[in-house]
Amino acid sequence: MVSFAKTAAYGLFSALLSALTVTGEPTSGVPSAQDLWLEPPTLKADARTSATGYYTLSWDAPDTPTGDSISAVTLFELQVRTDADVWRPQYTGPDRATTITGMPDGRYVYRVRVWRPPQPPARDPAAARHLARSSGREEDFRAGPASAWSIERTVDVRHYGLVRVVIILAVGACVFLATLVLVITGHRRLQT
Amino acid sequence: MMQTSAALSPFTGLMLLIAFSIVWVTLGWYWGRNNKTFDDYSVAGRNVGMALATATTLATWVTSNTTMVAPQLAYQMGLWGMVGYSFGSVGLLLFAPMAQRIRMLMPGGYTAGDFFRLRYGPVAWRVFLCISLLYGIGWLVSLGMAGGILIQALSGIPYAVGMTVILGVCVAYTLLGGLRAVIGTDFVQTILITLGVAILGVLAIRRIGIEPMHAALSAERPELLNLLLPVSLMFLFNNLLFGIGEIFHSNVWWSRAFAFGRGVGFRAFLLAGLIWAPIPIAAGFLALGAPVLGINVPAPDMVGPLVAARLLGATGAIFIFIVVFSALASSLDSLLAATSDLIVQDGYRRHFRPRASDATMRYAAKVTIVLLGVITWLVCLPRLTNLAAVLHLTGAFVASTIWPVAAGLYWKRVNPRAAVWAMILGSAAGLWAYFGIGFYVAALTGAAVSMAIILAGTLLYPHHFDWATLDESRDTATAGPRTQAGGPT
């Protein structure tokens, strides 16, 4: 709730700021740099269902017209929810993807949002990267505005069934043992 | 685009790249300066001794894939992913007696293609060449990609730049020194790799600790500790057969069997296999430390370098950089040399210029190495997929050659037509499994279908073969080098 209020307040503030600072541009129809600044990221999953227990999630937020230096000073917050219906933190940081592995059977729902620093974006790319990398500066981002949450993505994990696994294991063992016997007996026969 | 934190500055990374590039190219020139004949260039004079033979075998099989894909598989499939990758050593162990047999049957041989041509005839030979070249390019691409990913992960240098430099350096020194340069640099690289991986494994255990690692995995990634994880069990024999297929068919290993001195091959492959087995376990172990260290892994093939850099800091990142650069170069150069041999010997000479002179062959080999480098660079540039996916796609093809190679070396009665169909249908079945089920069953399916066809063909339609046919050096001894051996088939 607090987060929502903060976001809404910043949204109003950023709209005013945008109207004041982006002079010479029409204020209607064209999204301003500040609007893009707080647009929610787009979340993608490389699979809707996973039989392996691993999958990769990726997300992106639009860059503003001022370029890379802005996209570098960004903190993403990824959350996960299982059937328990409680959102838990999955990842917070500057990366734009994460690989989830070792998950047991179940349904996993993800969402992501972006935090921006309260200061105007750094124009110097090196300084921006330094800010983005510094894990100790997470509070810098938290003090700033957050976007709305992205559209949720669901991944269902259903591991392969036992019958299929046993068949594949048995075929593999047979082929391997036959190859082993072929080489060893061939070699021994030649030696003798 | 994925954004990650790098442990080294781009400047440090660039300095390391330049320094090692100079070292490898200089060593390549130094070791190759006495090459006089095509035999010197392509099979290192056929008299490589035990120490160099073991080192080059080990270094070539410890690829950047060992140090990057092994952690990836451990991260995705847990304990069996890590152990399963180490089963790749079985391929080297099984090839030890075969190397001895190859050297005995084909004392004047140059390539694996020679075996298929003489043993099974032109159709099987050409099918084999297609498979082998596809695999060669697939492996080259996976190595080139690994180079770019590694350098980007450790130093922030853009993927395309790192990949280009590594490919360029390996092309340059292979070009200068041929197989002699490859084997010489492999020796130095082996020392760097084995020391590096051993130190890394010990550091990982000491700095993370088994108990915290176990606790973090149990809480966050429980299936990685599950010894009955379905996908990892399915992968187990697949990886084993993939490794066997890679080694049995690839000219990288056949060229070494031809290059090693008499009696050296068996012991060198056996020893290298035994030393190799624990290396992927040490490398894979790193990946299991990612959850406890709180490391985010944007792409699974980056997990090894990311954990290593976090564990050891900037100095450690330099260390990792050197180790993996060595592993990568030692495989890239071997593959460039062996694939160019296959193209020049089996493609250019056998199909177009049977009477090509020694100088012409050396020139053709050099042009081919450059072309291979350019093709690899072009395919690597867009970074279309991840490392394991590239590598395991080729598994469908190479596993289908296991039985045609092994049975062809030991059984007189293998039917040549069965060998052809074993490779074609085995590859097709492997591809079907790759796309229909997953990469973790492609090699297994290809090998199983191929084996069934060889067994059925040999039992139902046995074919008699005279082993003496494989020894072409008897003809060349009477007619002079490179005039008789290369008639078009």
Image: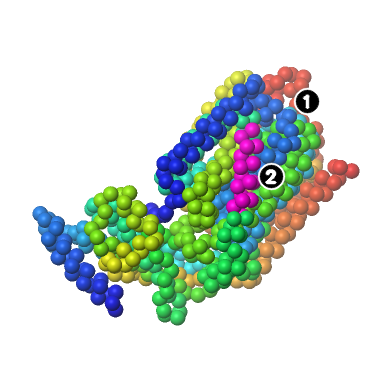
- Where disc 1 sits, the SS reads helix
Mark 2–mark 1 Cα distance, whole angstroms, equals: 25 Å
Q: Is residue B34 above or below residue A102?
A: above
Residue at 33%, 49% (x, y): give it: A126
Q: Which residue is mark 1?
A: B474
- Looking at the figure, which quarter contains the C terminus of chain A? top right
The residue lying toward the viewer, choosing from B121 and B129, is: B129
Q: Amino acid at mark 2?
A: Phe
Residue at 60%, 26% (x, y): give it: B30
Q: Which residue is mark 2?
A: B248
Discs 2 and 1 carry the same chain letter: yes
Outermost left residue: A24
Report if residue B244 is visible in the image: no
The residue lying toward the viewer, choosing from B487 and B462, is: B487
Mark 1, Cα crowd under 10 Å, few <14 / some 14-19 / many 20+, is: some
- Where disc 2 sits, the SS reads helix
